[in-house]
Image: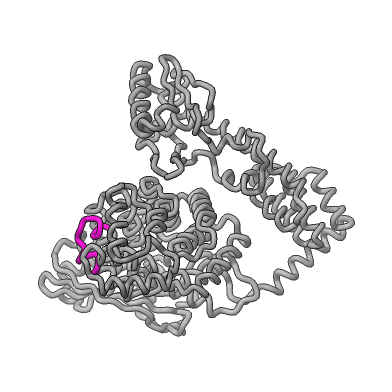
């Protein structure tokens, strides 16, 4: 849910009940809604007096959010409320008007209506179910009409897939998909569509496709025997295209029991060693793309470190994390390393962690947070680069996503464009791949931020749609949540909504350093710069050698600049530029800080390098693209750019 004007200056109400009232009024607009109806939907389990008081409080909140400019749209009478007037546009009502619809009309409706308001009240949930059904029927009606008029087969197939994300059990659209494949000469594609239709209906507890759909299959295959031959041909083609190596949606990580280097004098280290491996296993299991081998499976073969040892075959681990603990007085030293079992037991990463203290649980929590935050991105990059080297005839969606990640981190333009193409293919292979949607949304964010998008507005819209879809597909994927939140905050200029997603991501996985950084940025966009520094510092402390550390330093620039600590902003700007000279955002805050400091010579150098990356970047462009919500923050940023000589 979003509410804004043409300049993005109107935010959402803070409470979900106030948002729900706004949604009910918007979907009923211009018709009035009785106050009694609102209380029965949102406070159905409260006494009438309490419900009316809660409604009055929520209406006051709405009026404050809309302010004097847009408050006129909200009409509050004694017995009813309504939302109407010149200047009001509700996207969910756009299907009801007489304007010509296109495939772009359908795209936003692939996401469930008001998903973020589910669970407010049983009565409201029932109302929401009815509204979603009504809206889906309207969308499908428009979509079927567009499908019948579409002449281009490729465009028609894309539209059909969009409609099937809205209703996978719609046999009419499945039949249209089968016909489109047949018309293009792809009988195997038609057969695959039929099989997908059968699977979708089975998920709903139905026995199978209707006789009409079965008859269409026979006509396309020129008889049932031909249809069976098509199935055999498809199975044979898939077998020929497959690669010997099995494909998994996750890597397998074994966490070895942590060894004591001085077992005769363990002290507190004994308890720390016992708990560390279990906590590490639990923490790594929070990442969707990692599956952990249990410690009990590994303890029996803890002494066998070679990849050729016979017992390792039964474990099937791709990587092993092992470590040692040593204590001297109050000082604890932990050595951890990653062993790649598919590369001859090669040690591919090693770190030392030194701590002071005797509180075993506090030490354990601190060490686990830092180890996990550093190991996970290392595995992600290594797996992506390894997958790029593999030769395969066909690639799964997961493999395509992994291959794209190193190029997104590096920001080399040629590789970056190739990464976008891979992510597009990944979603074509698996339209329900949540992580693929999240990374592709993130890719669009960088495309806009780097000035590489030919149509920034269209790229921003696509990024937001992909982010919303990622959250819809897997609301418990912490990385997808925080990526989607950053897209909402930066591209959508709705940092408060983004912050909610970041906080949920951190609740699901507190060891995700990227989520700490993104949540810090969202706080800074909202003007809470001191709070922002705390969160971004946490990310840097947890993962100082992160592949994204240039982004952490860039994030530190923003609150320091807006707090007037220009020297600090320059320090982090210089570090960010050194770590990744191709990331244009690092130069912008850096340049503004130099302008405020009057360091003209340095500003000239940084401005030249920035304009070499984004030749048309200007003060007005910076203002238009910035997600900062406070006018004073935006003015300070822009003034620094002017002082640094950036063209208006």
Provide residue 292's location: percent of width, then percent of height: 42, 65
**Residue 248 seen by the camera:** no
Q: Quadrant of residue 282?
A: bottom left
Q: In the drawing, does residue 333 fall left or right of residue 178?
A: left
Q: In the drawing, does residue 38 fall left or right of residue 338?
A: right
Q: Which residue range is magenta in the image?
A: 559-571
Tell me which residue sits at (57%, 69%) in the image. 247
Q: Looking at the magenta stretch, what is its main secondary structure?
A: helix
Q: Is residue 565 magenta?
A: yes
Q: As rendered, which of 82 and 48 lies closer to the eye?
A: 82
> What's the colour scheme?
one colour
Q: Is residue 252 magenta?
A: no
Above/below status of 416 relative to 82:
below
Provide residue 219's location: percent of width, then percent of height: 87, 53
Provide residue 16's location: percent of width, then percent of height: 39, 35
Task: Assign the C terminus to one quadrant of the image.
Answer: bottom left
Above/below status of 337 relative to 130:
below
Q: As rendered, which of 468 and 240 lies closer to the eye?
A: 468
Q: Which residue extends farthest top?
A: 78
Provide residue 580's location: percent of width, then percent of height: 37, 74
**Residue 461 seen by the camera:** yes
Tell me which residue sits at (39%, 68%) in the image. 584
Q: As rendered, which of 545 and 34 lies closer to the eye?
A: 34
Tell me which residue sits at (41%, 64%) in the image. 617
């Amino acid at each position: 849910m979003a509410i804004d004007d043409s300049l993005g200056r109107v935010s959402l109400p803070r409470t979900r009940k106030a948002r729900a009232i706004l949604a009910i009024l918007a979907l009923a607009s211009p018709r009035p809604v009785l106050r009694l109806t609102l209380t029965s939907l949102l406070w159905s389990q409260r006494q009438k007096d309490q419900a009316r008081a809660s409604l009055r409080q929520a209406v006051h909140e709405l009026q404050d959010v809309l302010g004097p400019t847009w408050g006129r749209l909200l009409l509050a009478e004694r017995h009813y409320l309504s939302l109407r007037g010149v200047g009001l546009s509700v996207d969910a009502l756009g299907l009801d008007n007489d304007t010509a619809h296109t495939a772009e009309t359908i795209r936003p409706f692939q996401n469930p209506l008001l998903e973020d308001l589910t669970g407010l009240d049983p009565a409201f949930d029932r109302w929401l179910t009815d509204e979603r059904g009504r809206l889906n029927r309207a969308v499908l009606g428009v979509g079927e009409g567009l499908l019948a008029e579409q002449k281009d087969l490729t465009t028609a197939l894309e539209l059909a897939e969009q409609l099937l994300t809205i209703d996978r059990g719609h046999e009419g659209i499945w039949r249209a998909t089968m016909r489109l494949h047949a018309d293009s000469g792809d009988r195997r594609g038609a057969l695959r569509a039929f099989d997908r239709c059968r699977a979708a209906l089975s998920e709903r507890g139905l026995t199978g496709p209707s006789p009409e759909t079965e008859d269409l299959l026979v006509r396309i295959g020129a008889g049932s025997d031909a249809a069976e031959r098509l199935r055999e041909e498809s199975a044979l083609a898939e077998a020929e295209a497959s690669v010997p190596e099995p494909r998994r949606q996750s890597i397998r990580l074994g966490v070895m029991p942590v060894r004591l280097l001085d077992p005769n004098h363990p002290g507190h280290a004994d308890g720390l060693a016992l708990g560390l491996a279990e906590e590490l296993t639990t923490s790594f299991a929070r990442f969707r793309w990692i599956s952990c081998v249990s410690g009990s499976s590994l303890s029996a073969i803890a002494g066998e470190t070679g990849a050729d040892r016979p017992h390792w075959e039964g474990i099937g681990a791709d990587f092993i994390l092992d470590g040692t603990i040593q204590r001297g007085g109050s000082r604890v030293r932990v050595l951890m390393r990653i062993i790649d079992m598919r590369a001859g037991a090669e040690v591919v990463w090693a770190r030392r962690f030194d701590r002071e203290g005797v509180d075993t649980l506090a030490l354990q929590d601190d060490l686990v947070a830092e180890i996990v935050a550093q190991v996970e991105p290392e595995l992600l990059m290594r797996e992506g680069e390894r997958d790029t080297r593999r030769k395969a005839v066909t690639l799964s969606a997961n493999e395509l996503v992994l291959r794209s990640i190193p190029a997104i981190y590096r920001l080399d333009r040629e590789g970056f464009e190739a990464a976008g193409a891979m992510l597009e293919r990944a979603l074509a292979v698996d339209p329900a791949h949540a992580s693929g949607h999240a990374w592709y949304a993130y890719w669009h964010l960088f495309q806009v931020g780097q000035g590489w998008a030919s149509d920034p507005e269209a790229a921003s819209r696509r990024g937001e749609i992909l982010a919303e879809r990622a959250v819809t597909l897997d609301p418990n994927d912490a990385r997808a949540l925080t990526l989607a939140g950053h897209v909402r905050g930066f591209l959508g200029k709705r940092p408060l909504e983004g912050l909610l997603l970041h906080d949920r991501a951190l609740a699901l996985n507190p060891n995700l350093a990227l989520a700490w950084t993104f949540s810090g940025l969202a706080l800074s966009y909202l003007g809470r710069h001191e709070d922002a520094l705390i969160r971004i510092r946490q990310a840097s402390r947890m993962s100082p050698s992160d592949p994204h550390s240039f982004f952490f330093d860039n994030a530190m620039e923003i609150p320091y600049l807006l707090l007037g600590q220009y020297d600090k902003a320059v320090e982090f700007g210089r570090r960010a530029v050194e770590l990744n000279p191709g990331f244009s955002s690092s130069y912008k805050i850096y340049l503004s800080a130099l302008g405020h400091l009057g360091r003209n010579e340095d500003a000239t150098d940084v401005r030249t390098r920035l304009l070499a990356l984004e030749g048309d970047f200007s003060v007005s462009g910076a203002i238009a693209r910035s997600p900062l919500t406070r006018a004073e923050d935006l003015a300070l940023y822009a003034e620094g750019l002017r002082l640094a000589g950036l063209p208006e």
